[in-house]
Amino acid sequence: GAVGDGVHDDTEAIRRAFAENENRVPIDYQTVYFPAGTYRISGTIRFSRFMVVRGAGADRTVIRLKDGAVGYDDPTIPKPVFAVGYDWPYQDRDKKQRAGNVIGNYLSDLSIDTGSGNPAALGLDFHCNNVGGVENVEIRSGDGAGLVGLDFKRGWPGPCLIKNVGITGFDHGIDAAWREYSLVFSGIRLRGQRIAAIRNRGNILSLERVTSENRMPALQNEGGGLVVMIDSRLVGGAPDATAITSDNASLYLRSVEIEGYGRGVHETETPKDGPTESRYASVASRIDEHFTGPFDHAWDVGERGSLKLGIKATPEIPRPPVSDWVNVRDFEDRVVEGDWAPAIQAAVDAGKPLVYFPAGANYEIRRDVILRGAVRTFFGGSPKTGIGNGTTEEEEPAGGPALVIGNDLPVFQFHLLGTRHVRHASPASLVFRHCGTGHISAEAGCGDLFIEDAGGKWRFNEHQRVWGRQLNPETKGIPEIVNRGGQLWVLGLKTEYLSTKIENRDGARTEILGGLMYPVHPVEDEDLPMFLNEDSDLSLVHAVSAYGRNHRIYCRDIRGGEVRDFTEWRWVNGRPITNLYRSSR
């Protein structure tokens, strides 16, 4: 019933669309699609969780609040235009809006315009946990007013991935709070904010490729927060302004350009047993590397700073028009006794760049499927849709049926589609976006691996070079990530439960830039290290939320048979934070 002509009020039609999809049982991901058009609304649009919301493109689909809308006039009572999460009164958020199970929300390919004369507006009030995010979205204020463009102040936001987002106007472009569970940003553009481009009060933000064009501060960090910022440009600052301020919080900055500001970075710290320290950490036009507080290292290697592993952007594979999709269910007549392998192979060989797997099914294979020819993407209806191989999560799928990456492919991606077993021996780059895999059999000569916004139990070997953004492994009693000889770079790692977070062995090189280690339960095993590094290279920047009892051993470092347990913790504003830990050979 929505019109999308910019004139009719589409509020109720859009609300009905979400209500009908949210209430389906059993719960699975549903998709709401906004065709090209301008959708005029007069009040908040909300959805709760397990929703995939897409437009036709940020330049083609616009959701616009009418000028002077009712309820958007009092800045002391924030009111969202688009709200994602449970439906509680926003003004009571500090008391009631706490939730850690708002899982799997995706919003992409549209614009949100808060109109003019709406000073109480929040452009996008976004809440999501574990997996989900915002991608290819523009958020703007018609007259520059409004409180926040992208708001993360409801209880316990993240982890999630915010990618390729532009924000114009508002008091704050991005505003985050709380101590859990961490947020990852990549390719963010901020312009014309009236107080600060980004404000963080306690959470953990990992940011890359941020461009801020503002006279006001680009970043305000406080309250025990941790911000990692790399490969970014902060320009247009006023001569009497400071680009980055950090008050009783932590920073890790690398390759950050600053122009126009009179001061680069200003930090204040108030220790429990001492006076407040105030320092200007940088006035340079470029910060090569800066981190708050002392540098921790396991061995006297004579080197400072992180490992600085080379960074690669995830390959972008354009989504073709639907006329170039092939639906795997068109070949359902080839399924033999539950084996989807012949059907999937036929879909691959149909010569289209994208094979689509409708939601609501698990596609089991009993033999290998070769990915070859024109195909570049397997696209699923939801992260819960998957391609199995007859093994359970408790079993090791290696050696069983697999999706085999062909030698003739330059790149291949799995998007919103889980997989049980992938064999990667070709030079093709392999991409997992908004999904995980049970196992990757990586062999000599395999290409690069990129992972964005994914859960899973990750096991890497000496053949792999891996770039991860927003990884959320959650395992109990076994290591979350094992790296045996590979190279692993992660922007934003969040872990959960009682386990060693990373085992780094056999000459592995691992660099973690931001994220949260969250044991959940008291760590009663005093011999369980948070990290283990054996004859390998490791650098870490992250925060910890541990309630009851934390890991006694931060990192067990082994070199040539000699074991050193590092047990000291750095505390910032009442929480353990690792500003930088490095152990390298």
Image (cartoon, rainbow, N blue to C red):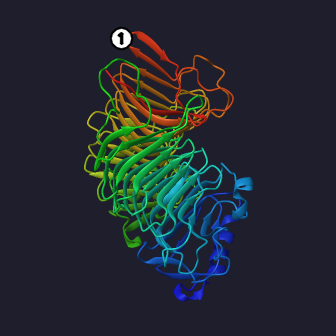
Q: Nearer the viewer, residue 511 or 364?
A: 511
What is the number of callouts on the image? 1
- Residue 399 visible: no
| Residue 38 percent across, percent down from the top left | 50, 82
Which residue is depicted at the point 60% across and 27% down?
477
| Residue 564 percent across, percent down from the top left | 45, 13
- Residue 394 visible: yes
Residue that sits furthest to the bottom in the current view: 7
In the rendered view of the protein, which quadrant contains the N terminus?
Answer: bottom right
How dense is the environment of label 1, judged by Cα within 10 Å: few (below 14), some, or many (20 and up)? few
Q: Please give the residue where the numbered disc 1 appears in the rendered image.
A: 560
Q: Nearer the viewer, residue 263 or 418?
A: 263
Question: Is 138 above or below relative to 392?
Answer: below
547 on left or right of 175: right
| Residue 57 percent across, percent down from the top left | 42, 72
354 on left or right of 144: left
Question: Is 471 above or below relative to 120?
Answer: above
Question: Is 303 above or below relative to 89?
Answer: above
* Location of residue 137 by image quarter: bottom left
| Residue 232 percent across, percent down from the top left | 34, 52
Could you tell me the amino acid type at mark 1?
Gly
Which residue is depicted at the point 36% across and 60% down?
237
In the rendered view of the protein, which quadrant contains the C terminus?
Answer: top left
* Location of residue 584 by image quarter: top left
The secondary element bearing badge 1 is classed as loop
Question: Is 327 above or below relative to 5?
Answer: above
